Image (cartoon, rainbow, N blue to C red):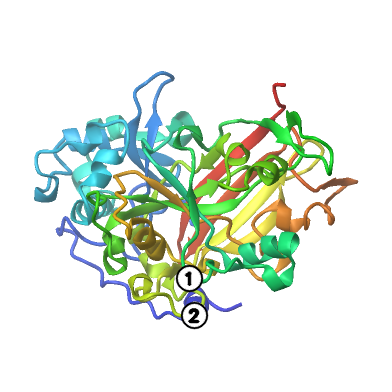
Amino acid sequence: MPSLWTICELSVSFPPRPRLDMPEADYRPDQKSFIDVNPESDFPIQNLPFGCFRRDAGDRPRIGVALGAFAIDCRELEAAGLLAHPSLGSDLPFSNPTLNAFMALGPDAWRHVRSRLAYLLDRDTPTLRDNADLMNRALVRRDEIEMALPVAVGDYTDFYSSREHATNVGTMFRGPENALMPNWQHLPVGYHGRASSLVVSGTPIRRPCGQLKPGDDPPVFGPTRLLDYELEMGFFTGPGNPLGERIEVGRADRHVFGMVLVNDWSARDIQKWEYVPLGPFLGKSFATTVSPWVVTMAALEPFRCPGPEQVPDPLPYLANPHNPAFDVQLEVTMWFAGLDAPHVVTRSNFRYLYWSIYQQLAHHTVNGCNVRPGDLMASGTISGPSEESFGSLLERTWRGTRPIAFGHGASRTFIEDHDTVTLRAWAQGPGFRIGFGEASGQVLPAIV
């Protein structure tokens, strides 16, 4: 099996091991923390994703970073003066219950805080390691906390940027000759989603009701019969842009804070009847699940790689920066009563995405649309070239005509009540993995 670097066609040069008295030392592949971390953990010291959590039910959320089986409370480190830097000014971003204020500060502040955390958590740095009182306040086991949405999301946009997915869906409904709409190869297609129904992983999902159109009969009201998952990733924006100005594609990376997993649950039968002429509505807005830990772009930088070839060349304002994709492995599992273990239904990769996150942001703002700190941009369903890599049940079962067998006589064409769907993602490095945790939800019966 080829290595990560061969797959990406990318030669990665990591920075040399820095002196430990350098408070802004970048992470390195051989770095270890004084906190023991399982080599297969999603959250080694090379990752340090940000999230928001509650120590007790009803508690105000706190900002922290994940490290192995623990979370580090950034509010405690900030209060102790360990994160101060000119890029933060007099702001105390970690006194807030969400990441929005920190995201608004921009890449210099992000870089300092991440580097400072990597230094403080290094096994050879005594500042935090040997301070028992501060350790007791700042360190908490992740299995003892409740995760919250990491961001107060003001706006949510969902793109449609996987060529394989768009081709599959177009082939089903329009035939192979007209699979892609005329605009698809020229711009990142997207629609504005519903920010209020974004939920954090672990939140149960209620089966939605709406209008269904059975064949040539009049529409009827009832629960969706074709509930589906959509395997996506999303990014949160940082400083943003003033209304009337655009974000150039070559500077878009300065406005992308980090990434999460996204399951854009879809009611296919409700969606089919309602989407003409204005697009998705009730078939999408009932729930969207996101993973709770935001993996920074700095942690993903070693995994940058070329994206798919774009033909025809996009217009100049969409010209991709160098290596705009990321080699992140994706997986979807389903579990329900009667299964011995979760069953893998999709294995894909983020590098299959045709329109990059930088192109998405540049196109989103090219008309002067302003984006704000904490806006969420989702990729759209990510599908690859093989059936196993198709990112939805609509594709995996080809509109329900090819049921997926789970063994012991169980099968699925679409999601049934009490099924649990879990998305996972990770980038595999030499001796460590940059993981995203999971975006998981169980489907509850509809309330009719």
Tag 2's secondary structure? Answer: loop
Residue lying at 50% horizontally and 33% vertically, measured from the top left: 197
Q: From the top left corner, tell me how far across and down residue 52 is, in percent.
A: 37, 35
Residue type beneath disc 1: His
Residue type beneath disc 2: Pro
Density class for disc 1 (Cα within 10 Å; few <14, some 14-19, many ≥20) is some
Q: Nearer the viewer, residue 429 or 427?
A: 427
Q: Nearer the viewer, residue 122 or 147?
A: 147
Q: Quadrant of residue 302?
A: bottom left
State if disc 2 and disc 1 touch (CB < 8 Å): yes
Residue lying at 84% horizontally and 43% vertically, measured from the top left: 216
Residue lying at 27% horizontally and 46% vertically, measured from the top left: 103
Q: Which residue is mark 2?
A: 312
Using the numbered discs, state the Cα–Cα distance from disc 1 to disc 2 in whole angstroms. Answer: 8 Å
Q: Which residue is mark 1?
A: 186
Which quadrant is the N terminus positioned in? bottom right
Density class for disc 2 (Cα within 10 Å; few <14, some 14-19, many ≥20) is few
